[in-house]
């Protein structure tokens, strides 16, 4: 019996062998994880470079003479033509700064309109009770699915009757009427994640809806408001179709519409100046995303969260 118990006990050599096999297995798993991590990062870097290549090529081409822009797909500068920026800045009827200022006017008005009216509409959908609330919310969601080409003709007819064509009013006034359903939906989901106990405590203290909205909701909605402002800035700054339709005076062109003037189908186009001013136009969007990305992540990540 003693011999059987002694034989059933694991020896020191067998325990060491099991530990060695376990360590080897863990080491193999770690090597596989490292290889997979390196492969994933390498793939992401390659894909990132592929996506960045057109932008990098545009920046490099803005410093090349016109004759060598389309003949060299590389990113190495053989000749340096910084005069493209000075030529592009003064190539049109007005200095390019005028078109940047025109874009800024529309952007500021659009941001103000979306922040004010979309937040008020979102609070109404999220906290108030009124008849046909669900139908109104559904209709708002439907507007998000309509392409702009379906709406542009009736909008043009309406604004023409109001004598708003060739002004910035068709591009700014609708923003003060809560016409961007995406931002309303974004803020509705954010407000629903705010505990209703805060509203009830404020009502006990005698606060009405406007006081609750301005003193309680707005400070808590900072991530959603920042997300709305950044997206509005990027989309409005990059808008071309709407600004081309409603603004016909060359002196009132925005930056995106003014860039089209560098390409002439009947004469020689100055692509060096075009790329130079494209880089200048791209800088505000790049800076907005660079400094606002943390607000974008917070606003999107917390939307609808409890």
Image (cartoon, rainbow, N blue to C red):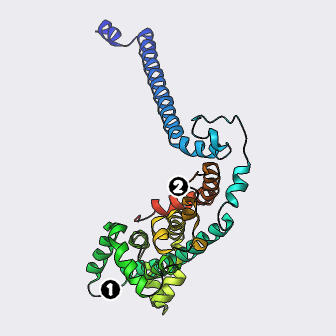
Visible in this render: residue 141? yes
Visible in this render: residue 219? no
Q: Is residue 147 left or right of residue 230?
A: left
Furthest toward the bottom, the residue is 206
Crowd class of label 1 (few under 14; some 14 to 19; many from 20; radius 10 Å): few
> In the picture shown, does residue 298 fall above or below 26?
below
Furthest toward the front, the residue is 266
* Mark 2, secondary structure of its residue: loop
Marks 1 & 2, CB-CB < 8 Å contact: no
Q: Quadrant of residue 215?
A: bottom right
The dot on residue 129 is 1
- Judging depth in this view, the residue of 141 and 56 nearest the camera is 56
The dot on residue 266 is 2
- Looking at the rendered image, the quarter that the C terminus falls into is bottom left
Image coords of residue 125 (percent x, y)? 36, 79
* Mark 1, secondary structure of its residue: loop
Crowd class of label 2 (few under 14; some 14 to 19; many from 20; radius 10 Å): few
Image coords of residue 121 (percent x, y)? 41, 80
Image coords of residue 66 (percent x, y)? 64, 44
Task: Using the numbered discs, state the Cα–Cα distance from disc 1 to disc 2 in whole angstroms.
Answer: 60 Å
> In the picture shown, does residue 89 fall above or below 206?
above
Residue at point 35%, 73% (across, down): 151
């Amino acid at each position: 019996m003693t011999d059987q118990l002694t034989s059933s006990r694991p020896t020191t050599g067998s325990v060491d062998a099991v530990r060695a096999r376990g360590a080897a297995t863990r080491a193999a798993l770690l090597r596989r994880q490292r290889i997979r991590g390196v492969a994933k990062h390498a793939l992401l870097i390659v894909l990132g470079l592929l996506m960045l290549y057109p932008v990098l090529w545009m920046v490099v081409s803005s410093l090349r003479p016109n004759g060598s822009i389309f003949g060299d797909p590389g990113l190495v500068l053989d000749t340096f033509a910084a005069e493209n920026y000075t030529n592009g800045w003064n190539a049109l009827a007005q200095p390019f700064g005028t078109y940047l200022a025109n874009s800024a006017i529309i952007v500021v008005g659009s941001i103000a309109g979306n922040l004010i009216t979309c937040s008020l509409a979102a609070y109404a959908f999220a906290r108030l009770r009124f008849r046909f609330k669900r139908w109104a919310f559904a209709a708002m969601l439907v507007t998000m699915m309509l392409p702009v080409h379906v709406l542009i003709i009736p909008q043009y007819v309406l604004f023409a009757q109001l004598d708003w064509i060739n002004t910035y009013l068709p591009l700014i006034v609708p923003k003060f009427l809560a016409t961007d359903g995406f931002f309303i939906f974004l803020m509705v989901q954010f407000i629903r994640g705010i505990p209703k106990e805060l509203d009830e405590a404020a009502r006990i203290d005698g606060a009405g809806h406007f006081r609750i909205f301005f003193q309680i909701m707005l400070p808590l909605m900072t991530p959603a408001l920042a997300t709305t402002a950044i997206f509005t800035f990027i989309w409005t700054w990059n808008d071309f179709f709407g600004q081309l339709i409603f603004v016909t005076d060359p002196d009132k062109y925005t930056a995106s519409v003014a860039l089209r003037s560098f390409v002439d189908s009947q004469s020689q186009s100055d692509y060096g100046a075009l790329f130079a001013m494209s880089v200048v136009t791209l800088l505000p969007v790049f800076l907005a995303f660079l400094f606002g990305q943390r607000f974008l992540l917070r606003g999107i990540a917390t939307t609808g969260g409890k």
